[in-house]
């Protein structure tokens, strides 16, 4: 068994329930299995498979199954009990569960010493319409199949127009993959990007916007900044100009919504990852990943990088909280970089400092490296130094 500083286990076997089997949940699991392999862990997730979300846009090149790892396989590897279900959560039930140290799911009572919430952010923009797709659709089908099917269903005499809504990291990564997919399949189609702000990728340094905008021009992708999406109807898209507030219509045979994360399922935590409700600490309930906001100096960005770091930290803190010393570690992780891929051979990112913008193959190589680190973690090999 590996040694974790400030963790002197008591004799009792710990019971930990992890709600959500994404990046934060899996990272926490690997820590528990490394430092306290006899912990009785239960993972609850509505899906049968863990999805390597950071590759989702690549399903225009690879099958979705390449990104899925079944929870059954993971449970054999890390020795946990898996329950396929969506657990309804809110602050009131969390307070009750803290008091009871148990929760009820499908009439089964699950007793726990610690509960860890890692349910992710939940995505905006689920619009049930024939010609509209959102991130949720790509979690169950490969991008290549989805796009081909939608274009076949919605045949038109003219060249089809595809609108991508949202110039954040997800929208941009999908946009470039779609462009290359259409080119590979020799599908004649016009592609446009609609974004509600002036700058693309606004949470990143200016160099990101400048680089991506130049690539859009080279690839003949129409770009509408400062434009709000209203709705898609009858092969048309209704838009509103942000400055003049005037509405206008453009032809669009297919619309893809990448509108970012909902903030409604966000839980506040102290610097150690324990949930705060009405300014009271729920000692035995921790949170990590996109559904968490830590009151600390560490990064709360909605990224796999932060999710993994928070997941690992809270797992260490769960063990320390249960131990003789009860000495917890604050969350201080800062982002080390971020790379946005622009198709299979190009990317833009920063590394070490936000002023250090890198593009092209070097940026792509860094992304690959980071992704392989996570692949190794899922195999039980932890190569994260920070
Ligand atoms: C296309 C794309 C590309 C990305 N690229 C990058 C990148 O290059 N770098 C980067 O750092 N980040 C990237 N991200 C962001 C990254 O994927 C997220 O920040 C990360 O997945 C967050 O991890 P998480 O564990 O908080 O949530 P998730 O990975 O979303 O996992 C949440 C899990 O909780 C489960 N769940 C939800 N509700 C419940 C419930 N009620 N009960 C039980 N289980 C529940 C879900 O099924 C899911 O398995 C990308 C995201 C996308 C969509």
Image (tube, rainbow, N blue to C red):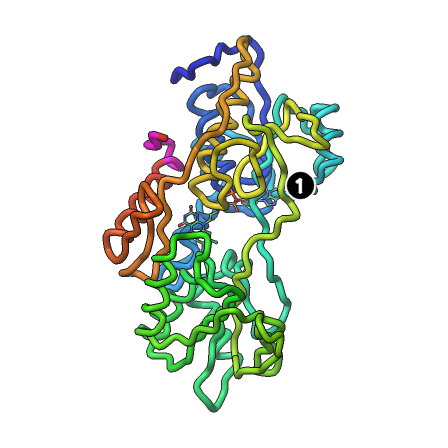
Q: Secondary structure at mark 1?
A: loop
Decide if residue 66 is in sight here. Answer: yes
In this view, the residue in front, 73 or 17, is 17
Residue at image x 51%, y 64%?
197
Q: Is residue 43 magenta?
A: no
In this view, the residue in front, 353 or 189, is 353
Decide if residue 108 is in sight here. Answer: no
Q: Quadrant of the N terminus?
A: top left
Residue on which the image places disc 1: 87
Looking at the picture, how far across and down is residue 2, in whole percent? Answer: 38, 18
- Secondary structure character of the magenta stretch overall: loop
In this view, the residue in front, 123 or 352, is 352
Q: Badge 1 local density, few (<14 within 10 Å), some, or many (20+)?
A: some
Quarter where residue 246 is shown: bottom right
Mark 1 CB within 8 Å of ligand 1: yes
What are the residue bounds of the magenta stretch?
377-385
Looking at the picture, how far across and down is residue 253, in whole percent? Answer: 52, 80
Tell me: 337 left or right of 27. left
Q: Is residue 173 above or below residue 311?
A: below
Tell me: 315 left or right of 172. right
Looking at the picture, how far across and down is residue 305, in whole percent? Answer: 42, 41
Q: Is residue 52 above or below residue 208?
A: above
Residue at image x 47%, y 48%?
51
Looking at the picture, how far across and down is residue 360, in whole percent? Answer: 26, 58
Q: Is residue 113 above or below residue 308?
A: above
Q: Is residue 380 magenta?
A: yes
């Amino acid at each position: 068994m590996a040694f974790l500083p400030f963790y002197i286990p008591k004799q009792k076997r710990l019971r930990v329930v992890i709600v959500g089997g994404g990046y934060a949940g899996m990272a926490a699991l690997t820590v528990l299995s490394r430092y306290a392999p006899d912990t009785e862990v239960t993972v609850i997730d509505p899906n049968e498979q863990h999805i390597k979300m950071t590759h989702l846009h690549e399903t225009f090149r690879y099958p979705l199954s390449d990104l899925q790892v079944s929870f059954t396989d993971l449970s054999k590897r890390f020795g946990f009990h898996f329950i396929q279900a969506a657990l309804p959560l809110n602050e009131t039930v969390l307070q009750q569960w803290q008091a009871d140290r148990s929760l009820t799911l499908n009439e089964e009572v699950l007793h726990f010493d610690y509960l860890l919430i890692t349910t992710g952010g939940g995505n905006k923009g689920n619009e049930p319409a024939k010609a509209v797709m959102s991130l949720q659709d790509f979690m169950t089908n490969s991008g290549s199949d989805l796009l081909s099917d939608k274009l076949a269903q919605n045949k038109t005499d003219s060249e089809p127009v595809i609108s991508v809504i949202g110039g954040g990291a997800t929208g941009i990564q999908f946009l470039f993959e779609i462009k290359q997919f259409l080119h590979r399949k020799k599908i004649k189609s016009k592609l446009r990007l609609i974004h509600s702000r002036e700058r693309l990728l606004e949470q990143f340094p200016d160099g990101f916007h400048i680089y991506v905008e130049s690539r859009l021009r080279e690839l003949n992708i129409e770009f509408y900044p400062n434009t709000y999406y209203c709705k898609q109807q009858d092969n048309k898209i209704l838009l509103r100009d942000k400055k003049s507030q005037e509405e206008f219509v453009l032809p669009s045979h297919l619309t893809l919504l990448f509108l970012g994360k909902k903030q409604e399922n966000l839980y506040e935590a102290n610097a150690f990852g324990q949930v705060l409700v009405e300014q009271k600490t729920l000692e035995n309930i921790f949170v990590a990943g996109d559904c968490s906001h830590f009151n600390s100096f560490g990064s709360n960005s909605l990224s796999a990088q932060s999710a993994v770091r928070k997941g690992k930290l809270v797992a260490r803190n769960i063990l320390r909280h249960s131990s003789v010393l009860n000495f917890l570690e604050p969350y201080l992780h800062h982002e080390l970089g971020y790379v946005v891929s622009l198709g299979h051979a190009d990317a833009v990112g920063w590394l070490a400092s936000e002023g250090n913008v890198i593009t092209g193959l070097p940026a792509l190589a860094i992304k690959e490296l980071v992704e392989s680190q996570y692949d190794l973690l899922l195999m039980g090999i932890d190569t994260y130094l920070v």
